[in-house]
Image (tube, rainbow, N blue to C red):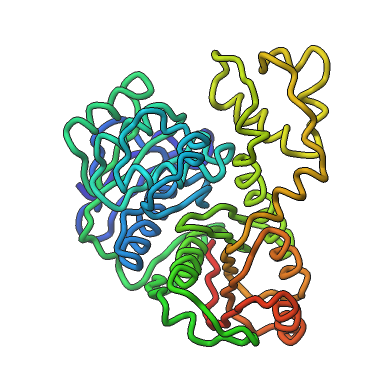
Amino acid sequence: MNEMELKYGCNPNQKPSRVFMEKGDLPFTVLNGKPGFINLLDAFNGWQLVKELKEATGMPAATSFKHVSPAGAAIGRPLSDTLKKIYYTDEVELTPLACAYARARGADRMSSFGDFIALSHKCDKATALLIKKEVSDGIIAPGYDDDALEILKAKKKGGYCVLQIDPNYVPADLEKKQVFGVTFEQGHNFIKLDENALSNIVTNNKELSKEEKDNLVIALIVLKYTQSNSVCYVKDGQAIGIGAGQQSRIHCTRLAGDKADKWWLRQCPKVLELNFKADIKRADRDNTIDVYTSDDYDDVLAEGVWQNFFNTKPEVFTREERKAWIAKNTDVALGSDAFFPFGDNIERAHRSGVKVIAQPGGSVRDDNVIETANKYNMTMCFNGIRLFHH
């Protein structure tokens, strides 16, 4: 099949809508449900991302995509007991692929609400059981175990979108799209991101461990499929904060840093011990924790509000307590899809535990950026590779 009609385009008024191949058949099969225009954009970008993560690390990978940018991405490293709790893995016996999805979904749960999932490997039962409990629009993977497929087909009253991608498909060298009736053409971004992109270290500190190299490569691959401008914080093989689509680089760095801080704050004993009512839905719990760990925490504690969520009134999580806990987060890697124009980005990254950085370089103020990194004994690479994605 070389053509598929869609219900509508980005919005319901944008009709007709279809996807098609100028040559050959479509590289995917619909196993269940009916994908939409944005679903397919997320699916194809997400598949490329996890395929590259798998090739770069040799491990299963997953991403949680929302509106043409990843909300989370990770490789399948084991989870600590704390991460199992905050990622709601419950009693599922986790496989490496399930760990990858739990990490991808769990880093920024609010942004991942209603995600489109991409998996690097055949979806197994454990991963499907995690997906079963989440609000999600669909999934793309190179295959599905029979029991996993049955679990996924039952989601959304049988309407959950399940796509199977041809893992051997390679896109054409040239890609096209139209804007305002004008056709754009460019070479597909086949650039391979690996440790070779980290060889030009420009700071006084030249040390990069294998773990740090892996985290930086993961950050760069995530950025390759994130709407520009974009910045990505990574720790322990997973993106913990992604800032996407901002006009200012410092806003990307702040947004991603704030998300990384929220991820870390969820692991604070004070948050883990919150006494929620048993019938609270996951989304309501996530939203409440987001407020509780912010400067808006008084809203949660207001009379007549906290009773809706908690069995007992929680203690105030003060700004000083939050700042002290965030300071304990260390060994974070940071990638940027284009150069940092000012040292303020490095200052903000330092506040969220960043130790190593990869960015293209090329700013007229590179000296200031390097000087700021040296102030905190960071290791920073200039890879010379811009990763704009639109």
Image x and y of residue 166, in percent? 22, 53
The answer to whether residue 28 is seen in the rendering is no
Q: Nearer the viewer, residue 229 or 272?
A: 272
Q: Does 30 sit left or right of 208 as displayed? A: left
Q: Nearer the viewer, residue 317 or 33?
A: 317
The answer to whether residue 67 is seen in the rendering is yes
| Residue located 77% across and 49% down the image | 323
| Residue located 38% across and 74% down the image | 192
Image x and y of residue 229, in percent? 63, 63
> Is 39 situated above or below 182?
above
Q: Does 202 sit left or right of 53 as displayed? A: right
Q: Tell me how many marks there are.
A: 0
| Residue located 21% across and 40% down the image | 144
Image x and y of residue 11, in percent? 53, 37
Q: Quadrant of residue 117?
A: top left
Q: Residue furthest left?
A: 146
| Residue located 50% across and 51% down the image | 70
> Is 240 situated above or below 101?
below
> Is 125 situated above or below 333?
above
Q: Quadrant of residue 175?
A: bottom left
Q: Nearer the viewer, residue 89 or 29?
A: 89
Q: Quadrant of the C terminus?
A: bottom right
Q: Does 154 sit left or right of 176 as displayed? A: left
